[in-house]
Image: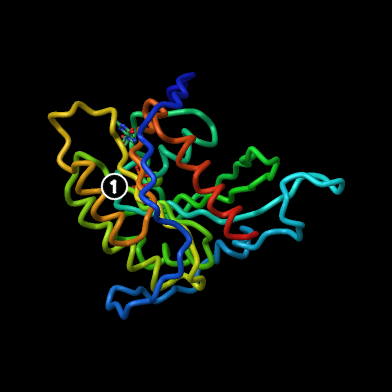
Amino acid sequence: MEKSSDQSAGGGWCSCGGGASKRAKPNSALAVKQNHIQDPYSISVGGSGLPHTGGGLSSAGPRIVEAKVVLLGDSGVGKSSIAQRYCKNIFSDSHDVTIGGAYLQQTVTLSDGTQVKLHIWDTGGSERFRSMVSLYYRDAAAAIICYDITDEKSFQSVHFWVNEMINNNDKDDFVMVLAGNKCDIETSKRVVTTQMAADLSQKHQMILSETSAKTGEGIQELFKQIAERIAKTKK
Ligand SMILES: Nc1nc2c(ncn2[C@@H]2O[C@H](COP(=O)(O)OP(=O)(O)OP(=O)(O)O)[C@@H](O)[C@H]2O)c(=O)[nH]1
Ligand SMILES: [Mg+2]
């Protein structure tokens, strides 16, 4: 794996007001029945936080919030690369297909001292894993729905992943983020414009972000924004 020290905290972030608003669950034929395989929720901590007083720091120590975050999207859009960049600051040019899901963890410290411990589930986007992926977003506090800005099909699939999340998540106040990845690739290859993404994110009340797992652009901001939203929701 190629090691990189590049962790740009550049642009790429655009919050379109989405987030943890309550969502109605539409009827969808796309909902997938859950299989009886290892339930990732039994190993991960769900969306619940620990007892706290509302402030970030108190005599009892910092407020600690724990939350489950799931990465969704078609195969090859860069979900694992985003997770690896964020948690390990590494990037690989190879596509190692994720089978089922992979777990990573990272803690974000907010400006008021609150520590948000993110339990990150990176899921496999390949069609053959779809039936098991629903296990990973059950009770997630946030979903990062990824597409590749050079691949229109992956953008069209966002509807599928949004419906999956809405129909299979037990909560109705989760945060949804739309992440357009691979924004380092030359402009002539881009097929999904920022405007197209902004329209879609507004429709589904999602936070919008453009990222590059390769350069690190937008990655830190993406997770920080999620942590802030989750911390706010749990007050
Ligand atoms: N240029 C560029 N390539 C990227 C970026 N992110 C990922 N890639 C490449 O895209 C390919 C797929 O990346 P993965 O992270 O494995 O994709 P994935 O979404 O996890 O795929 P599945 O596990 O099959 O669902 C790899 O060859 C990565 O190197 C990026 O930001 N920019
Ligand atoms: Mg993967």
Is 8 placed left or right of 32 in the picture?
right
Q: Is residue 211 above or below residue 125?
A: above
Q: Nearer the viewer, residue 224 or 123?
A: 224
SS at mark 1?
Answer: strand
To which residue does mark 1 refer?
Answer: 147
Instruction: Name which residue lies at 46% across and 49% down.
Output: 122
In the picture as drawn, the residue positioned furthest to the left comes out as: 188
Residue 144 to residue 83: above or below: below
Percent coordinates x, y for residue 68 in the rendering: 56, 56
- Badge 1 crowding class, 10 Å Cα cut-off, few under 14, some 14 to 19, many 20 or more, is many
Q: In the orientation shown, which residue stands out farthest toward the right?
A: 59
Residue 47: percent from left, percent from top = 60, 61
Judge whether residue 164 can be spotted in this image: yes
Residue 54, given in percent of the width and then of the height, sits at 72, 55
Residue at far bottom of view: 27
With 148 as the anchor, is 110 left or right in this view? Answer: right
* Residue ID at (26%, 42%): 148
Instruction: Name the quarter showing ligand 2.
Output: top left
Amino acid type shown at disc 1: Tyr
In the rendering, at what x and y percent does residue 166 appear?
39, 69
